[in-house]
Image (cartoon, coloured by chain):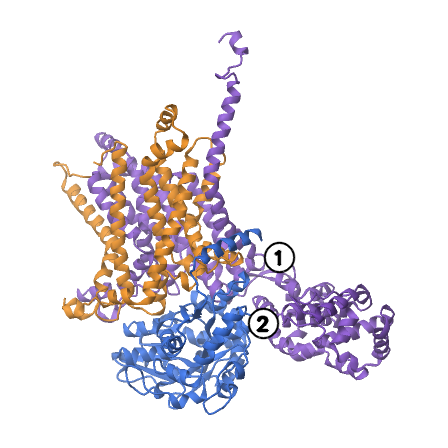
Chain colours: A purple, B blue, C orange
Amino acid sequence: MSDTTSDQVLTTQDGKPLKAALARALRREKLRSFLLIAPLLIFVLITFVAPIIDMLFRSVENEIVSETLPRTVVVLEEWDEASGQAPGEDVYNALLYDLIIAVENKRHTQLGTRLNYEQTGLSSMFRRTGRRVDDFGEVYADQLIDLNAAWKEPVTWATMLATPEWISAQETWAANPSGPEPAFVVSEAARNALPTTADLYGAFARFIQTEDSDSPMEEDPWVPVYKALYQDLIANPDAASAFSGETATLVGQAAAAAPNFETVSIKELFIDADDDWGSAENWAVIKTFAPKFTSGYFLSAADAQLTPTGVELKPEDERIYLYLFYRTLLLSIMITVSCLLLGYPIAFLLAALPLRYSNLLLILVLLPFWTSLLVRTSAWKVLLQQQGVINDFLVWIGIIADANRLVMINNQTGTIIAMTHILLPFMILPLYSVMKTISPSYVRAAKSLGANDWTAFWRVYFPQSIPGIGAGAILVFILSIGYYITPELVGGTSGIFISNRIAFHISSSLNWGLAAALGTLLLVAVLLLFMVYDRIVGIDNVKLG
Amino acid sequence: MKLKTLFLAGTALAMAGGAATAEDMTLVSWGGAYQASQKAAYADPYVAMHPEVNVIWDESSAEAVAKLRAMNEAGNITWDLVDVVASDAIRLCDEGLAMEIDPDTDLAAAPDGTSASDDFGDLLVSECFIPQIVYSTTFGYRTDVADWGGKEPDDICDVFDLEAFPGKRSLEKRPINNMEWALLCDGVAKEDVYDVLETEEGQDRAFAKLDSIKDNVVWWSAGAETPQLLADSEVVIGSTYNGRLFALIEEQKQPVKMLWDAQVFDLDGWIIPTGLSEERLARVKDFVKFATDTQRLADQAKYISYGPARKSSAPLVGQHASLGIDMAPHMPTDPENAKNTFLYNYEWWADYRDDLDAKFQAWLAQ
Amino acid sequence: MSALPPYASPLQKTWHYSFRVICGLIFFFLIFPIMVIVPLSFNAQDFFTFTPAMLALDPAGYSLKHYNDFFTNPDWQQALRNSVMIAPAATILATFLGTLAAIGLSQSHVPYKSAIMAILISPMIVPLIISAAGMYFFYSRIGLQGTYWGVVLAHAALGTPFVIITVTATLVGFDKSLVRAAASMGADPVTTFFKVQMPLIIPGVVSGALFAFITSFDEVVVGLFLGSASQQTLPWQMFTGLREQISPTILAVASLMVAISIALLTVLELLRRRSERLRGLTPG
């Protein structure tokens, strides 16, 4: 290269610099390949990856407690669980308001079910209380109505708490009802003077309008609303000054009478409905699970639990998941090993035979691969049971007595045999594709140098087939640790996998958070193996028949 | 949210092709002979009267609670009427997934004018539950077991007696019923069972009793398994629903008999999901009123040996549709069969299900 | 291995034959469970086991009633119809998207190639129960649970890795100079694709499509979670059949499916031979 040319810029025919033209071509090629890949990438991201990420989120999500008991969890912050005493009256008051809203919206039993995962008995505590909470505070309602019958009228409440704009909008609507009633708006004045009442009544009005499609002007407020009003009037005896006209008189009268009202402890009402409300332990559970996110499901998946004092292992007789993970791994290893033992000779034979024979024999490998999983599993059911084909045959030829037929199904043996059969093609195919590439001349060379058959195989052939073993073994292992259908049908109790437990939590126990946590752990294990597989084989080198 | 609209729009477009006609009614049930009996006794006569209605059956009752919850999250209820056991009905009602009904307006009165609420009586265990049948979980045993020396079990505790009655047993793969039976046979009085089971020691006692036969138990999770296991002689005695055993004994003529002792009564019935459109709701209510009237419930007993839930249906129970035998003696409620029964406590299990299930699974895995 | 040399020692002879016997036994293990289903499906009784009459080869022990049941029972027919509605739609979707992406991936200079590949292959690797659970929750949220398209999209996602793998494999052997030659002679990229590339990769596309088809046609877990009654497919019907009532109709269906598998396998083998012929390789 001379000095002159090195300074010159190479150009294409149309005079543009070659470097830029090449870069542009490269960009265009990148763009084109990207446009080809994009549709599928987006498709897989939406239909497959997003659902899985969504599931991961479920394993930590715990909004139900703070959404169902928003007032309670705030007040509960102040409570010291170490005191060993149930919280004070203010927590129970907040609980009353939360619970009446939850009961009307039928959310309280869902919350009970959620908390029952952590502490047995909370489910019935919420259900039982839910049936009675609608008359908690009745004593206040009675006294207010005795004081002035106007408190019995829905209109009194609505006009007291609504904004003037809403009242006039409602009047217009009532004169000519078309479409839904205007949404109830609590007035600022009422919110300042009677905060608890305004809050609870607002929830009531929303519920009446959206769930029942009725008007707050016509529906009696919930009984606890009266208790809220009493509470507000005691806290703010001067509340009447915020109102005008008839309402001011009414509120003033009630505020004056309130200090002499007969009172009732809401705490006692709760404890009366269910003793468990008096237990500090139960309250500690509610407080522990109040945050929006929880590690509780993951801890459960690892046989641990979150207690107010920290993380601890579950009692021994409830530990199961770690053992199931261990068993899933152990059985998967056994299945992988038996696949290898059975698959290696077959792959070896196929690789050694001329292509026209090996292709025919390959069909024998592919036929099971193509046959429905359910068909193969049911076939094993027929074969393996105690009165099944194999036992019948063994009894017939006299190897075993009729009385001691072998138990080969509904246990680990059944799972291992059936799954080895099902996964064997996944071992044979990668092994075969690697062995096909091993040149027979190496073995011949070894033999000509004096190695016997075994040495030639073990020292020369076998090491070259190891990549195939790695590929097949990891593929079989990955597939087997996630199996569900086959263990479900032939595994009994000792042959089931963690997947079966995940399915159980999704469809029977409905503990979806725990199912998601178990699934996440399983997924992490599989992805780690997938990475190893990528290292050994490379994902673009997966071959299928 | 945008994504959802997009998908909904796509789905709506696809559906506009006309897959679902306006008069489709999806009934969810358990499949098998039970669903067949519902079809023959309720749905077929109804469709004969209302040919415009197209009944679709979905065999998803076993996963009904999970699927209804998912449908509710999606705001797209595809089921019109769901057959569930009482405990699931209570759960669904609690969660607001099932609609509350008024028995006296939504259900037909008895022919003699007795109101539906009196006719069903105590069986209306939840505001949402429309009972159909009383069934029981009980044991069947083979009558040709050589090792038993001609004896036949007649007591629930014979299930736990491997000396007198050797051989494999099949039990359901869940704690419910098994724990109660174990305690009954460990000397706990019937009325104390749940009090004892509430304590750590009581649970240990039940597990210890179950331990004594654990090695000889095949665990089942679907109702068809025990009959198949008994027919194949894979087990000599096993628990399942009484209707399954009836089919095995009377229809398939297998050498099996029923052990009615300590049978556990349970209920099965319909719930209407919440969130149906006015039109669908009206249609399904019309169907339910018809399908749960006195005659229809009695008719169902022609096909399967479950007791009708109405008192007024009992006298109308006749003969089996194809076998021509009297069905009354095969009902779990027949006085001869119901000498010793056990009542299952829904509320108690709602609390202890999660806890005991974890312990039960851990025990199984040991 | 293929032939025993004449100078083989007795030990080698013994090993040679015993190795063949071992392989024969393993092949027997692979095939026997599938073959055992066929005679059982002609069982005259409603059991899953061989009856004495069948073992005695008594014609009275055999019957076609389970086949009859399959072809007349509305439940099975509906399931068959659903399978036939769902599997082709999922196959077309998976094949179309998968082939495009495989072509894209086969170009040089694809940024983040291995990460993209990992994502695209993941539906094959992630345990089905996790895919099913995730899709169940997510599709519920976006209103696809229990719909025809929900099942089709899910099945298509599960089928795409197979299309990618098979099409990529054919593209590896594809000579890029053919494309350049076509371009240099003035063909535009679309013409080049249809006239040059397409005929050569078609065997890969078809075998990928077959894999995608069988994935959907044989899929039960995801269908079980995502589908509702109107999407009850054949494998689903078989699964509930196995769990709820053990009827030999399942075996009749199974036998028919084995027959279909053999037919599909033959198609695949013929395609493979065609592909090798086209690439100038002759099957030995």
- Identify the residue at the far front of this view: A176
Q: Measuring from the top left, give residue A315's x and y in whole percent.
A: 54, 66
How many marks overall?
2
In the picture, residue A327 is in which quadrant? bottom left
State the separation of the CA atoms marked 2 and 1: 21 Å
Task: Indicate the chain on which mark 1 is placed.
Answer: A
Residue C86, x across and y down, in percent: 38, 55
- Residue at point 18% right, 43% down? C16
Kindly identify the residue that appears in the image at 41 percent across and 88 percent down.
B314
Q: Secondary structure at mark 1?
A: loop
Percent from the top left, x then y, of residue B255?
26, 80
Per the image, the residue denoted by label 2 is A123
Q: Is residue B31 above or below residue C223?
A: below
List the residue tagged with mark 1: A293
What chain does badge 2 belong to? A
Q: Quadrant of the C terminus of chain A?
A: top left
- State the mark number for residue B107: none
Q: Earlier in the sequence, mark 2 or mark 1?
A: 2
Amino acid under disc 1: Phe
Judge from the rendering whether residue A106 lies leftward or rightward of residue A264; answer left or right: left
Q: Along the line of sight, which residue is nearer the eye, A71 or A166?
A: A166
Residue farthest along the bottom direction in this orientation: B112
For the point 55% across and 51% down, the residue is B3
Q: Quadrant of residue B321?
A: bottom left
- The percent position of residue A513, horizontal first and vertical second, equals 54, 60
Say what amino acid the circle numbered 2 marks. Ser
Task: Between residue B243 and residue A342, name the one nearer to us.
Answer: B243
Please give left or right for residue B92 compared with residue A142 in the image: left
